[in-house]
Amino acid sequence: MAKIFCVANQKGGVGKTTTTVNLAAGLAKVGQRVLMVDLDPQGNATMGSSVDKRQMALSVYDVLLESASVAEAAVFSEKCGYHVLGANRELAGAEVELVEVERREKRLKTALAEVADSYDFVLIDCPPSLSMLTLNGLCAAHGVIVPMQCEYFALEGLTDLVNTIKQVHANLNRDLAIIGLLRVMFDPRITLQQQVSDQLKAHFGDKVFNTVIPRNVRLAEAPSYGLPGVVFDPAARGSQAFIAFAKEMVERIEKL
């Protein structure tokens, strides 16, 4: 049975997409069967997984509107080693179209249940806003991975996210919990980042992943080549950190 995780944070620009594609590639490298679901109409995770969002015959939009199954719409990214259920601009229209339909927040959960035995991990890249798309992701997931920059405003965004997760847990998805906080774009030379990191560990304890993703130029360059950093430059410090994170995820899931 696949373990389904949302990569979510209501603050923009914190590295959600970078985390999703690199964790997917890292998990594939350590022998896991992975499906990456792009729920952001910008389609950055799709393009960053070496899949052209403009050329897709079917996308997550078709899955949410129940005109295609996940098995039909997902494509295998040869370069990255995992399956991609991609997104493009069409997905922005799904917000409006889903308003009137039944079970609108459970569409993704229902669709993923059909392929649960085909994968070990399903990673969902959520948009930064709390929209119907994000809600579909949270309703489908067993847990949430929260990428965080160790900065003051990030702590405020985290409070909002925790409240959202509590509401979804209470009303829509009893399985939902925060699996862990991932410190990303980390620079140990900046005193404030070290202080925020210590605060996170003091407050959230073992919910903070041991792996820390450093600020790394090669990770930032990789999307322009349509690849995760883990594939683009496996030897880079950031890529090595994501492979370590993938191993930590596998270990953590085995303990659950």
Image: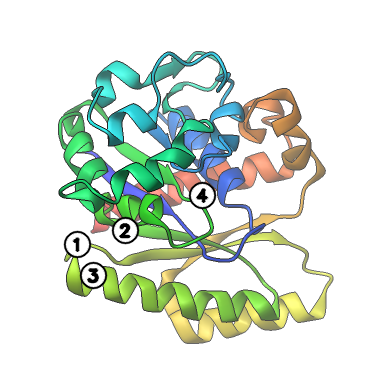
Q: CA distance from mark 2 to mark 4?
A: 16 Å
Of 220 and 202, nearer the camera is 220
The numbered mark, 2 or 4, whose residue comes first in the sequence reads 2
Label pair 1/2, CB-CB below 8 angstroms: yes
Badge 3, how many Cα within 10 Å: few under 14, some, many 20+?
Answer: some
In the rendered image, is residue 32 in sight? no
Q: Amino acid at mark 2?
A: Gly
Q: Which residue is mark 3?
A: 169
Residue at the image point whose x is 30% and y is 45% from the top: 98
Which one is in front in this view, the residue at disc 3 or the one at disc 4?
3
- N-term mark: 1 or 4: 1
What whole-number distance in Å separates the C-alpha atoms at marks 3 and 2? 10 Å
* Circle 2 residue: 143
- Mark 2 lies on a secondary structure that is strand
Identify the image quadrant of the N terminus: top left
Which x, y percent locates residue 197?
A: 63, 76
The image quadrant that residue 220 belongs to is top right
Element at label 1: loop
Q: What's the amino acid at mark 3?
A: His
Res 236 quadrant in image? top right
Q: Amino acid at mark 1?
A: Asp
Quadrant where the C terminus sits is bottom left
Relative to 38, is 9 above or below? below
Disc 4: which residue:
245
- Counting residues from the start of the chain, the first of labels 3 and 4 encountered is 3
Q: Position of residue 49 (x, y in %)?
A: 56, 27
Mark sitting on residue 238: none
Between disc 2 and disc 4, the foreground one is: 2
Residue labelled with disc 1: 175
